[in-house]
């Protein structure tokens, strides 16, 4: 596609519910990143994929967070047993060449009630 | 540890006035620095990178390793510059970006 596509745009979850957020990167982009952006804060790194390999997951805040990219294209970020502190915008970005910056998606705004 | 600090959460200037958005970083090696911008209802997008030494939309930024700063400047602000600006750092050989908290720039007519 022309850009990075994320779905859903908005998600309201009850505390304790599991959620799955999807990212469709730019076709051919090898690198894919997930970031979490809390209200009033800058994006914070969660995890990084190179093709299907998850090379860095140091930013995942707890074992309730899990990300996958099984075929090296679409990625899913799953959050189990959501908590109120998980409320944030989740950004996906992809990159085809390290020299350039990333292309970001519009994000998924997760609200846990 | 890698850290990016943007000391101003809000900055307001008049149209035609000079603008400077401050960014300081801490990193022990040679970092790559970026400025990203997010206009209202739009996605985060790259504004400029220090390695390209380019000027985009009249903005420039110089990496000052002595002061560990990468301030964003524009001599004459325009109303369409109103946006959220994020400074970001990438470590040597790293892939991930470390972002500052952002500065909301408002240009008053």
Image: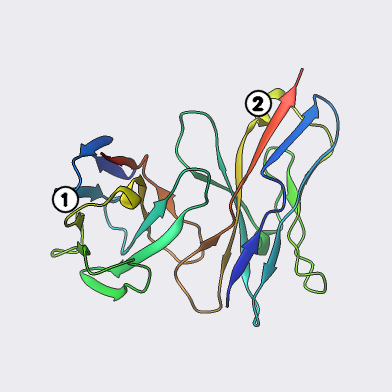
> Label for residue B80?
2
Q: Quadrant of residue A51?
A: bottom left
Residue A8: tell me if it is visible: no
- Name the image quarter holding the C terminus of chain B: top right
> Label for residue A16?
1
Q: Quadrant of residue A10?
A: top left
Which scheme is used to colour this image of the protein? rainbow
Chain under callout 2 = B
Foreground mark, 1 or 2, reads: 1
Query: Crowdedness of circle 2 by 10 Å Cα count: few (<14), some, many (20+)?
Result: few
Where residue B34 appears, x then y in whole percent? 61, 57
The relative height of residue B78 versus residue B24 in the rendered view (above or below) is above
Residue at 20 percent across and 46 percent down: it is A15
Where residue A84 appears, x then y in whole percent? 30, 48
Where residue A104 appears, x then y in whole percent? 41, 48
The relative height of residue A2 versus residue A35 in the rendered view (above or below) is above
In the image, taking residue B24 as reference, residue A86 lies left or right, namely left
Residue at 38 percent across and 60 percent down: it is A96
Are discs 1 and 2 both within one chain?
no
Chain under callout 1 = A
Where residue A107 appears, x then y in whole percent? 35, 42
Residue A93: tell me if it is visible: yes
Q: Quadrant of residue B85?
A: top right
Give the camera-side residue of B13 and B94.
Answer: B13
């Amino acid at each position: 596609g022309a850009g990075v596509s994320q779905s859903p745009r908005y998600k309201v979850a009850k505390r304790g519910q599991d959620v799955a957020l999807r990212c469709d990167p730019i076709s051919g982009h090898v690198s894919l990143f997930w970031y979490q952006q809390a209200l009033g804060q800058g994006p914070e790194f969660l995890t990084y994929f190179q093709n299907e390999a998850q090379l860095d997951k140091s930013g995942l805040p707890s074992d309730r967070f899990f990300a996958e990219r099984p075929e090296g294209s679409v990625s899913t970020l799953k959050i189990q047993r959501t908590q109120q502190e998980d409320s944030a915008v989740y950004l996906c970005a992809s990159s085809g060449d390290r020299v350039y910056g990333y292309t970001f998606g519009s994000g998924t705004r997760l609200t846990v009630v | 540890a890698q850290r990016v600090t943007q000391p101003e959460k809000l900055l307001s200037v008049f149209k035609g006035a000079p603008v400077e958005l401050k960014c300081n970083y801490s990193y022990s090696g040679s970092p790559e620095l970026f400025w990203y911008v997010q206009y209202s209802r739009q996605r985060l997008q790259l504004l400029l990178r220090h390695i390209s030494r380019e000027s985009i939309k009249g903005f420039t930024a110089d990496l000052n390793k002595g002061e560990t700063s990468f301030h964003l400047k524009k001599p004459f602000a325009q109303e369409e510059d109103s946006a959220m600006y994020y400074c970001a750092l990438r470590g040597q050989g790293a892939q991930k970006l470390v972002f500052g908290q952002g500065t909301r720039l408002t240009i008053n007519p």
